[in-house]
Image (spheres, helix red, strand yellow):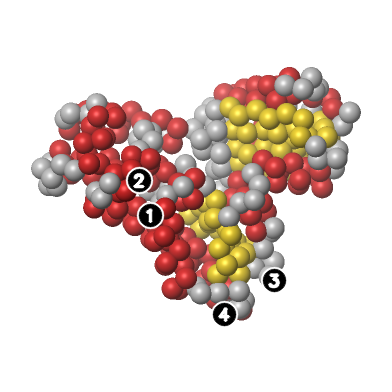
Amino acid sequence: MEIVLGIDSGGTNYRVMAADRDGQRLGLYVGPPASHHYLKLNEMKGRIEQAIDQCLASFGGSRREIAGIVCGSTGIDSARDLKIVEGCYRRLKDVKCPIKVMNDAELAHEAVTGGEGVLLISGTGSIAYGKNRKGMKARAGGWPLSIFGDAGSGVWLSKMALRHYGRWLDGAVPEGTLTKWIREELGLSSREDLVCLALERGNIPEKLPRLGKLVNQAAQKGDKDAKDILHGAAGELFLLVEDIVRSLGMEESEPDFLLGLWGSTLLKSEIMMECFSALVHKRFPQAVICTPQKEAVEAAVGLALRLC
């Protein structure tokens, strides 16, 4: 039996799905992230090998049956990145088939918009990708944490929450619901505690405490500072969309365009969605907002079938 693999390699987890040549799902495995920016190459390759083996084992598949692989991966921001990640897949043991690797934003763009329009991702990280009707492409954001990237994402919310907590430790803001919950969640009681957390975990997304849910819950309880953080995130995400529309000249040349949204940080926050949607409709009334009807890993399977 010939099978294909679709892979969604994100900042939070690594998802691999196997399907037969008719597109019927055979197996799915979800494992830890495998980014070359945060792992040594042999460790990254080990995680990929293990994930593929676990997926195949779930239905008794073999590597020699793989007829095509498509992977959308976070962290592919240059030709060098693509060469590194693609090279890792081409060195997989007992795998000899067509392989295509792309930025995960490009994969999500295909899944949500069908390959035309603007796609905004706000999950662990954030990035925007677009393709206009002339076939021109552009991307915005997706910068690493070390240069203050991922604006409006889950890690951005966590950092803004911790920054706000630091202001409370400084005595600059009164204690509110958000600061109280952060203290209870993380056990931080001093500036030293916060500094230690920042130095040990501040630049690796999977190690950061995930405080987005707390920020949303505090905002729903009426915490003004939490609401301000969410509104700030929505504004940062809107700027990514604006950059894509400007880069591709879509405001002038296209009477309407699809704006696909992806990622739980935005889609699962009612306050962020409301603020973001208002900004978009005010600035780009021709934008048609759409949300995912299938997972990125399913889109990768579809592309792998085409690749074969």
The answer to which of marks 2 and 4 sits earlier in the sequence is 2
- Report which residue position mark 1 lands on: 271
Q: Gap between marks 1 and 3, in whole Å? A: 35 Å
Answer left or right for 245 relative to 229.
right
The answer to which of marks 1 and 3 sits earlier in the sequence is 3
Res 239 quadrant in image? bottom left
Residue pushed farthest right?
1
Q: Quadrant of the C terminus?
A: top right
Return the residue nearer the eye: 250 or 58.
58
- Report which residue position mark 2 lands on: 216
Res 278 quadrant in image? bottom left
Task: Please name the amino acid that badge 2 sits on.
Answer: Asn
**Residue at 68% over, 30% down:** 28
What is the x, y in percent for residue 167?
Answer: 18, 44
- Report which residue position mark 3 lands on: 134
- Report which residue position mark 4 lands on: 252
Q: Gap between marks 2 and 1, in whole Å? A: 8 Å
Task: Please name the amino acid that badge 3 sits on.
Answer: Lys
Q: Gap between marks 2 and 4, in whole Å? A: 36 Å
Q: Gap between marks 4 and 3, in whole Å? A: 13 Å
